[in-house]
Amino acid sequence: MILTRVLAWTACLSSGLALALLLLGIYGPGAIEDALHRGVVESVVWRPDSPPEVDARFRGLPDPNGLPDYFRVWAWNLTNLDDVRHRGAKPKMVEVGPLTYVKTRVKIDPMWDRRGRVTVKEVDTHVLRPELSGADPSAPLVTLNLPLLGVLELLHAVTDASPAMRPLLDVLVGVLSAWRDDHVDGLFMRRPMGELMWGYEDLLLQRLQALLGPDLVASTAVRLLHNDTGEEDVRANQVPCVIDTGWRPSGPDASATEPGPPGAAAGRRGGRGWRLGSAPADRFDEHRIWNIEVEQGWHEVTSWGPECPERVRGTDAFQFRPGLRRGEALRVWIAELFRSAALRYEEDTELHGVTLWRYKPDPREGEVDPCHYQTIRGLANVSIPSAVGPNGNASAPAAHGVPVLMSLPHFCLVDPSVTGALEGPACDPERHSTFIDVEPITGATLRAAKRLQMSSQLTDSARATLEPSIPTPLILPVFWVEEASQVSEPQAAAFRAKVYGVLGWSSFVRKWALPLAVASAAVGVAAAGAMAARLWAGGATPGPDGWVRLRPNRAAPRVPREAGDTGTLPGLIGGVDAATRAAESGQVGGAGVAGGVGGEEEGRPAEADGAEAQGSGGGLTVPLLGGGGGGDGAERGS
């Protein structure tokens, strides 16, 4: 019986386990992955009460386990100016650099509104790392005199609009042609690389501002790159950006607002009564995660013209929506181009054991585009927005300023006619292309290199004014930059443990739950079969209700008997019953039993009367079963 019970329990437990494993195999992986996705979404959405590590990531605070973000600058040095001027030689451009800086981008004063948008200002600082640099910031460079070029273009536009200004232009041309100092040489200049990048006061612009007024010469400070001096300066002078975090506040305080700092939209710093998990499950719009809506106070660029407004949209390539698909394009906002751009999937790559998807700019974005004044493939023309701002009047004379052309370094993907007119630039796609490596589960960028080159043009009007010996207009590169960052090995290890660990369990369940369910079911069936076999062998029969019940199959204890007697206790009991019924009916007298007893009482042993008894006063003898022996005994007893 013990073995039968063991088999029964085994069958029951195996069947239950098989059912549980079957359900786990069907629903488990999806449930695990859904839970992972919910956790990922909550970790890539910046909210007022985000965990400290999430808040620090979006603010841009330094991570003790992370690597610094590097900002590198290369400048182009024109080494044969005299030959270009007097002999018509191709400009020979030599790359100088890099100057390597550690860049920090810290967002300050975040405020959330009831739509889940955050308003922030950003402090950008650059700290030179001489040991990582390949150039001296004080080394002089020969390049285009961009501020003077801009003034000339502006003056030509003014005189074209007002012919009465022509005499003034002629006077200025004479002054500028004769102007020489340690830095200015016609439409070219010599400046230390560090000054050219981070700024200097231009003496010639000071003279022109005094002559023409601030309306035509707005500033005498010249700089190609920006470096913030501190938080107070940013708070006082910077217009905030607005970013859609993808969070949709809900709950009892969904309409609660708090006033923000001066210049910021009303918002909340955490809300009253809101806590993680109190809002419904649909409180996130994943497709809007980290989408820029307002850049430095403007939500669209209208200076491209009335027919070509460019709405601010896309991310800053820091974070995309989680759960990416290879076929979809990613859209980023590039402030330097005053445009958004599409990135397309290129290939899978890996960093510290984490699988990443590499995206690069879609080459179709660089095609000729009259809407954005782009006339050369791969060369974005941002002259007008740079001159009048994103919302300025593109037809005003002020729109004519410094020609600003943006491309990939070394004119990668630019029409070959541009590089054909120069010596020096040589595109290397591995070193000069822009890419981002995105982790597709979280949508987080774990490695990136943003590379942009700024060039300018020696236009026909400027060349005719100050450089008539140069026969053709030239497009000359000025400098290019690289912003590079990637996660460290400890950061990647933490990611693998959190995300890949959960996915490992999901994969294990997906692979083994159903086979284990089949194996468990097989064990249950085998145990049930063995139990059934034992039950049938032991005399089990189905009852009226269909259940199999076991009849006892125990051997009955034997009663002492004469030699040759094969009676058993049940048979003897049946014989007693039969004898009793016979006596009551008169077929066999009660003396048959009583005589046996009486004989004992009279001192005559039963054996003396010839009875085949083994006697007790009960008369339980084998002859009693047949009835005849009892009768003989009764007769002798009388």
Image (cartoon, helix red, strand yellow):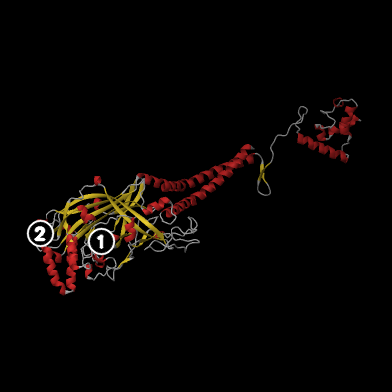
480 or 415: nearer the viewer: 480
Q: Amino acid at mark 2?
A: Arg
115 or 264: nearer the viewer: 264
Question: As drawn, is 631 to the left or to the right of 316?
Answer: right
- At x 40%, y 46%, the residue is 494
Question: As drawn, is 288 to the left or to the right of 454?
Answer: right
Q: CA distance from mark 1 to mark 2?
A: 32 Å
Where residue 421 appears, as percent x and y from the top left, is: 14, 58
Question: Where, quadrant-wise, is the C terminus in this rendering?
Answer: top right
Q: Which mark is drawn over residue 366?
A: 1
Where residue 560 appears, as percent x and y from the top left, is: 77, 29
Task: Between label 1 and label 2, give the one nearer the viewer.
Answer: 2
Q: Amino acid at mark 1?
A: Gly
Q: Residues within 10 Å of mark 1 (few under 14, many from 20)?
A: some
What residue does disc 2 label? 85
Extreme front residue here? 210
Question: Where, quadrant-wise, is the N terminus in this rendering?
Answer: top right
- Residue 600 can be seen, yes or no: yes
